[in-house]
Amino acid sequence: MVDLKSMKFGDELLKRGFAKMTKGGVVMDVTNAEQAKIAEKAGAVSVMALERVPSDIRAQGGVARMSDPLKVKEILDSVSIPVMAKVRIGHLSEASILESLGVDMLDESEVLTPADPFYHINKKLYKVPVVCGARTFPEAVRRIFEGAAMIRTKGEAGTGNIIEAVRHIRTVGDGIYILNSMTNDEMFKVAENISKSYTNLRDLTSEDLYGEGEKMPYNNVYYGMDFREISNEIFKILKEIKHLKRLPLVNFAAGGIATPADAALMMKMGMDGVFVGSGIFKSRDPQRMAEAIVDATENYEDYKLLGEISSGLEGMHGLDISEIEKLQNR
Amino acid sequence: MKIGILNVQGDVSEHFQMVRRLHQKYGVEPVNVKELKDLKDISGLIIPGGESTVIYKILGKSGMVDRIIEMAKSGMPVMGTCAGAIILSSDTGDSRVTGMNLISITIKRNAYGRQINSFIKTVDINGIGKFQAVFIRAPEIESPGRADVISSLDGSPVMVREKNILAMTFHPELTGDSRIHEYFISQVISTPS
């Protein structure tokens, strides 16, 4: 007989273990096999398959979906490093398709157009690990509860502007710091607050049926779980974070990294590694930019080296955040 | 006694914590090895798991390779796990990663398939016993060369030792079971400096 409980533990270990193997590395966005090969050669720890890089999604608009399976297969066949692929938030079927293609990790990403307005994917149901974005501490905790194997800051993809990634690192970090001084009672209240967004759909239904103020019970609000079960699980996650003084899984930075100095800043701020999207293949010399960002991530405090590798390296044209639609709010 | 953990890329901190946990019992202390000067006072070296192409590339640029080879040839114990075993090997059959030729194994990258094929299995290790081995996109040792096979799975070696060099295709740093690290540390302690 298969011991389900130990199997679950085993799956989690393999998923989080995979994420741990990417620590200190750079994951690069690629749209085809040729770019994937450049990334591998430059020292990428993994490549991320997507239909269009974020800055093109931004410029062209329209619905951004998972990459064409044909392209994903091409990319899978072209490199020996792991291949990740972006899936729309809540799109269970895209996730299963990408898993069946052999993708090593899924990125449930706000860069694509969301598919589900209420829920993220229940990542525990997949055998491949999933990385999710987060802007705030509660967001990170909810994604961990849903079974994410890795967290990344959302930042603001496709802008070449680092301010949002820094904002999200600081915001998550401050949440962890505050947790440190909390009693169990306070932490339980926080767990309930964090769990509230799982009841949004039920609240809407109650309001539709009975008008404002009436609340139907919160049973079966997320994949068969009721509110109490969810907040108990989230309480356990908070306890673990308090004990570890950090998120209990690998935490990368993403969204706006455009130069070696940006990558170095992310590492300096305690991140485990970086995702680079438009920053590489929208720069003048992608091969050189890719190598420089890898070097910067490994040697983020070697400022002499950082100066050398950044010399004459032209980054992508950046965008001011106040002028654009924010993908992070998805 | 200092045990160096090669801090290039991968799950460095997991090995670091494992060695630190054994500080009381064996008097060992983990140190991060990032550049040439960090190799100075170490009595043993662990090469962690990660992405072998990345470790190979960055290690090559770091200027540490020759010194590591020299120290290993003069008897310093070195342990490589997963990608670390690839880095130590003599033949990878893959131009993207060349091993340091410190152990005469032939090894094949990602031999079991992709992440979906990663698995946990109990293996029997000579001198240690049953061990929960975590294989993540693991390589396979196709030929042990002159190395002693100390554990196998389905007929192929998963842990080998050739004199002072220890290599395994799984991740003993992920399960909290410290016996393999203790085995390595005992080897370090019994090596005359």
Image (tube, helix red, strand yellow):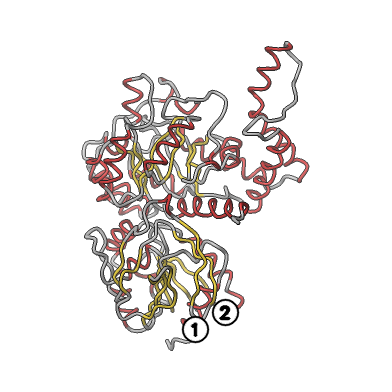
Q: Which residue is mark 2?
A: B26
Q: Earlier in the sequence, mark 1 or mark 2?
A: 2
Mark 1 lies on residue: B189
Which residue lies at the image location 53% right of the left edge and 51% below the top edge?
A: A11
Circle 2 SS class: helix
Task: Name, please, the residue furthest toward the bottom.
Answer: B192
Residue B31 percent location from the top left of the image: 47, 69
Rendered residue at 25%/69% (across/down): B91
Q: CA distance from mark 1 to mark 2?
A: 8 Å
Report x, y in % for residue A153: 48, 38
Amino acid at dot 2: Tyr
Farthest front residue in view: A1
What is the chain identity of the residue bearing mark 1?
B
Q: Is B101 drawn above or below residue A185 in the view shown? A: below
Q: Residues within 10 Å of mark 1 (few under 14, many from 20)?
A: some
Find residue A175 and report its horizontal and vertical position in percent.
62, 40
Q: Position of residue B169 (x, y in %)?
A: 40, 66
Closer to the camera in the image, A176 or A218: A218
Residue A211, image quadrant: top right
Q: Is residue B183 above or below residue A64?
A: below
Chain containing mark 2: B
Label at residue B42: none
| A35 or A246: nearer the viewer | A35
Q: Amino acid at mark 1?
A: Ile
Q: Answer above or below: position of B45 versus B95.
A: below
| Discs 1 and 2 carry the same chain letter | yes
Q: State the residue in front, B51 or A187.
A: B51
- SS at badge 1: helix
